[in-house]
Amino acid sequence: MKYDSLLNKYPLPKTLKEEIKQELEKLNVNKTAAKKIIERCYEMYLKNLMEPGEAAGIIAAQSMGEPGTQMTMRTFHYAGVAEIDVTLGLPRLIEILDVRKNPSTPMMTIRLTEEYAKDREKAREIANKIEATYILDIADVATDIRHMRIVINLDEKALERKQIKVEDVKKKIEKGLKTEVVEEDGKLIIQISEPSFKKLMDTFDKLKNIVLVGIKEIRRVIVRKENDEYVLYTEGSNLKKIMRVKGIDFARTTTNNIYEIYEVLGIEAARNAIIKEAISTLEEQGLEVDARHIMLVADVMTADGELKQIGRHGVAGEKHSILARAAFEMTVNNLLDAAIKGDVDLLRGITENIIVGQPIKLGTGDVELIARLGGRR
Amino acid sequence: MKMKLQDHMLVPKHEVLNKEEAEELLRSLGVKKEQLPKIKATDPIAKEIGAKVGDIVKITRESLTAGKSVAYRLVI
């Protein structure tokens, strides 16, 4: 307590302050000694700050690039959380930095409100509600060519397990196919109006793709117990629709699809998601990269208010300098386009100056000396 | 009950600065408005807090290294 007022005079980060406070409390020193200690800590802190003109981006690139070379290309065979396959390692890192709109293995972690989280049955209920269910999951479907009709033989056990009523199935199919469905001793029958085999098969295909219950993108749901609450893991992701489902604790529900987070929760949430996903990908491979490097990358990717990938269509492709762009990818195209348009390169950046062999504006090269002539004043 | 996107654990605290605060900030940082990072006016959170084009949004992040860090974005 008594050290707070002393510490608050220094512009130290919160975590550092807390650490110093803890140490001081352990030592239980008086005010003057504490002041000296804090003073020294602050000095050390200033010494360890980044120098102006330091090549932060290059250091970040190297710090992430070197461990990246050690990552295996292995993607699957490695069950992620609860039997759901998740892309891992280098492919996943590339996916994050490329801001893929459709990552190869989207996945959601859904947490439930208190009422549902404690009870397995209730958790299962929500799982049933969001999991996409097709007709083939709950019934045998046969085509009857002689009578030009499709016969749906509903599996009652499956219906009960999924808690779906026959009425609802009928309605959904009628809506999806825009035809009438007749119920006949426990079977649903769709009569095809024209005597055309093609029409029959088309209707059959359409029928297979109707989502009877749930959200189309959510292909599979797994219920798992985690620290005395039930959590749902899903294969496939649709944050926008999931957040409207009753019983879901939206504030603690996330997806690994960063673009979706950007669309639903905005740029700052996307920044956090990039950092979290990148760190967990690296950590999972046993690589330790300082969070600061990843934070810098995430900052660059989100600086303009929209998600930009690191690469040709994003950060690197938007550089002003022609030479810098040409040095990255598609050298000939870039140079040719610039030549046709008669562009001028002002040689202000780093890459351009290295290409032409000039000192770069970084570190000590960032300083310019101006001599004042005319003797002493 | 309408839920707030800002309650989500991934979303840090966003606030719109008033005119005096904005001017004070730009003076203390020694930068022009345009040099700040941007946030779109169509951003879901910007919409929720009612930020308009030209406003400056103060974002208080939970930083991994510093515990708490403050960032600013210009609404475009």
Image (tube, coloured by chain):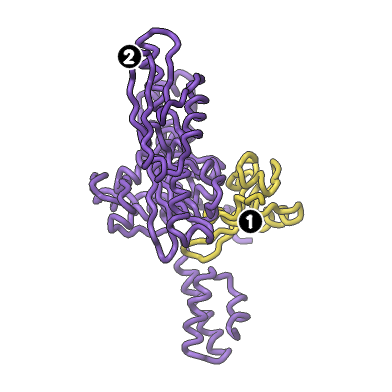
Chain colours: A purple, B yellow
Q: Type of residue at label 1?
A: Leu
Q: Quadrant of residue A351?
A: top left
As drawn, is A350 to the left or to the right of B21?
Answer: left
**Residue in the picture at 46% in, 69% down:** A47
x and y percentages locating residue A106 in the rendered image: 39, 42
Q: Nearer the viewer, residue A203 or B29?
A: A203
**Residue in the picture at 40% in, 50% down:** A233
Q: Is residue A276 above or below residue A30?
A: above
Q: Is residue A152 above or below residue A255?
A: above
Q: Nearer the viewer, residue A26 or A266?
A: A266
Outermost residue, front direction?
Answer: A185
Where does the C terminus of chain B fall, quadrant-wise? top right
Q: Say which residue label 2 marks.
A: A145
Q: Quadrant of residue A75?
A: top left
- Image depth: mark 2 or mark 1 in front: 2
SS class, disc 1: helix
Residue A365 in view of the camera? no
As drawn, is A364 to the left or to the right of A1?
Answer: left
Chain hosting mark 1: B
As drawn, is A146 to the left or to the right of A101?
Answer: left
Q: Is residue B52 above or below residue A152?
A: below
Chain hosting mark 2: A
Q: Say which residue label 1 marks.
A: B29
Q: Nearer the viewer, residue A125 or A304?
A: A125
x and y percentages locating residue A101 in the rendered image: 44, 36
